[in-house]
Amino acid sequence: MGLTPVPAPESRAELDAASPNWVTTKLSALINWSRTRSLWPMPFGTACCAIEFMATAASRFDLARFGMERQSFSPRQADVLICAGRLPFKLAPVIRRVWDQMPQPKWAISMGACASSGGIFDTYTMVQGIDTIIPVDVYVPGCPPRPEGLLYGILLLQKKISGESLTDTALREEQVLGPHGLFLPPSRIDEVSEPFGNSVHQTRSA
Amino acid sequence: MTISPSGPALQSRFGAAVTRVVESCGDTIAYVSRDRAHEILAWLRDDPGQHFNYLTDVTAVEYRDAERPLEVVYQLRSLDRKADLRVKIELAKREPLEVDSVCDLWKGANWLEREAFDMFGVRFRGHPDLRRILMWETYAEGYPLRKDFPLRGHFSRAEQTRQALAANPEAHYSLEELSIAETFHELPAEMRERLAKGERGKVG
Amino acid sequence: MSTRTVEATLSTTGVDAEGNPIGIPLTVRSGDEEHMLINLGPQHPATHGVLRLVIELEGETVVRVIPHIGYLHSGFEKLGEYRHYNQIVPLTDRTDYLSPMANNVALALAAEKLMGIEITERCRVLRVIACEMSRIISHLVWLGTTGIDMGAYTPFLWLFQQRELIYDLQEAWTGARLTTSLTRVGGLMADIPDGWEDGLREFCRAFPKVLREVDTMFTRNGIWIGRNQGVGTISAEEAINYSLSGPMLRASGVDYDVRKDRPYLGYETYDFDVPVGEHGDNYDRYLVRMEEMFQSNRIMEQALARLKPGPINVDNPRVILPPKSRAMSDMEAMIFHFKQVMEGVRAPVGEAYMGIENPKGELGYYFVSDGTAKPVRWRIRPPSFLNLASLPRLCEGVLLSDVIAINASVDIVMGEIDR
């Protein structure tokens, strides 16, 4: 039962860069603090959840107190893509392209049941969860989620970002489409999209 | 519930071309033959006693019983007479599903007929721009609202995702728009040939 | 002269035989002018949803606008064939998500027309209140977002605060702010709770003042008038021929309101006016919708005054679920409960079309039934679909920024257009 030996580092400098130390942790804390307090959302609003997103941005629930009032409709200046609403296949290349256009660091919130899993639409047109197309960080369930729910999702994202480390380069790698032109392998997409329960006929009648 | 006077008026004017007039839940429905449908609809719009100047809806219905024909349904309204009429054309499924377009009578029919084509595969002869409207132009799975089309589509989810992400330029721009681009010679040769022939795009 | 060519890669993996991305040149030379083909959307702040407009421009002037829809096509009509009538109610919330209660009411009315069911008086009045509340919230979104499109951000916040007040009422009644699923075939999901009437009365008292404030911001504002008057004009005959409905049709001078011409829910007994415009431009559409909100408030006050205690559901055990307490103890009630839950309410063979005055226009639901609990065909006649189809006609010869203004004044909701 041999243990796989750890390959020797290429250079001393690389080793220093790879391991977190007190400088990098302090720096990480500062950078993460500033990132979480100024997440500029890219509202990829499609359907009903977009209306609740607008309500969250309006006076009563107010996204501005989280630093998110400057909504960036241009992906080039956005930090977090909030996919608010259902995503049909016709819109799939659009969200992929918008995601690719966003510069690092970037995160994605899948808002609502339809963006997270296809929701009530297990039909020929609907993507069964945007995580088959782009990497998602936080899922907010609800149909539509209450504004408080979306705010909780945003706070969760802030917590996630706070836990990120500067030295972890894998975090900021672009996750591109694979060799088949797909983000997830085909078997995984089929597995994730399996109908849950009796989604076609919901009663015993024909 | 009584049948609207348009029913007997149609029967007396067009005779056998109006196969039957029935009533359901207070609405009058006139079944007309495909060949004279355009003439009948034009008369319904223009005749001063009828004056159905408002086209409420154009759609199609396929029944679960495979023997029943597919129906193209026109919902008409006369704004000044405050009257409604439903006109149906029955199309046997063994034959090509084609009817004449009514875009020349009501401009609102343009998109409605495109949708009926997209969802059912009914072709409207004389339509200025008959192409898919809700699905993308090179959608290859079929006509979604037909009864032989399963709810989740024919292809697997992975295949549907792959086709959606790999959509070629024709799926994004119609042939009409591609032909606006005058620097024609920079388009791929195969696409140029098909544009020249006026053909619809194919899936990549 | 030189040809300016803008290459754009259209798709993520659209590649030719050698693996180079396919670029489609987007410039055309037409005579002495250069036309440019630009793409607006589907992800765009001002398209009001996932609408894509391909605009052929000559400088800043629009030669042609080609709208592309279908980016939110969810298969509602197909899904409706696999659900029984009460299960279709939650689907209707999600088509026109700006005015969900109106859709719920429309569906219940269509199903009741198909089945020949007569609803109770209290249900009728409550449904009128629901429809008018929906009209107000839909117009509030329209006005707020149209203001933002023109650069006026403040009214958006004021109007959305009013929407929150209505959302509180909707949530108290149905439990949900947006996806209300209010109606059932033959009745409603629940009666209004105690104190709800006072809440609505308070809203009706305070709302006109807010509307008048917004009116002060917009109606005589030079920028608003400059951007909206004379823009996007359509004549009455064309509006009828394009099958427009709702405020789009009435702004052009056609006095067609389904509540007056083909009344339902007892609208003929309410005292309200229907604003009809004259010029058919953006400004008239704005005035029509503003006045409609005042009139909706008036209708709600009258409905509140005539609301009397009584049953909200029709007394038909085949259609309405028996109370749970009886379903567990009484044999007949248990059987009715079982049949309705397992099978759904069976409709007779037939078909029915029911059109109502949705905030966007005439919303029609067309059911074809073969005698089973699930419809053979559920057709949604979407008002915004037909209103949007006239966009190329409205945008002939205007400037690019006018396209945004005209698109906003059409008041579309993509969920309904794409279904």
Image (cartoon, coloured by chain):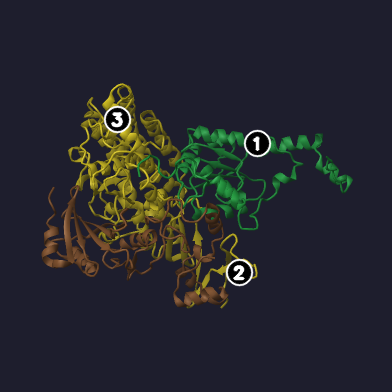
Chain colours: A green, B brown, C yellow
Side of A41 where C89 appears, left or right: left
Q: CA distance from mark 3 to mark 1?
A: 52 Å
Which of these two is toward me, C136 or B120? B120
| Chain of the residue on which disc 2 is drawn | C
Element at label 2: loop
| Chain of the residue on which disc 1 is drawn | A
Element at label 1: helix
Same chain under badges 3 and 2? The reply is yes
- Tag in front: 1 or 2: 2
Please provide percent x and percent y for residue C30.
Answer: 48, 76
Side of C294 where B44 appears, left or right: left
Q: Identify the amino acid type marked 2.
A: Asp
Element at label 3: helix
Q: Identify the amino acid type marked 1.
A: Lys
Quadrant showing the C terminus of chain B = bottom right
Which of these two is toward me, A48 or C419? C419
Q: Do we see residue C135 in this rendering?
A: no
* Residue that badge 1 annotates: A160
| Residue C195 quadrant | top left
Q: With respect to residue B83, does B122 lie above or below?
A: below
Q: Which mark is residue C16?
A: 2
* Residue that badge 3 annotates: C335
- Tag in front: 3 or 2: 3
Numbered disc total: 3
Tell me, yes or no, whether the two marked residues, 3 and 2, touch with CB atoms within 8 Å. no
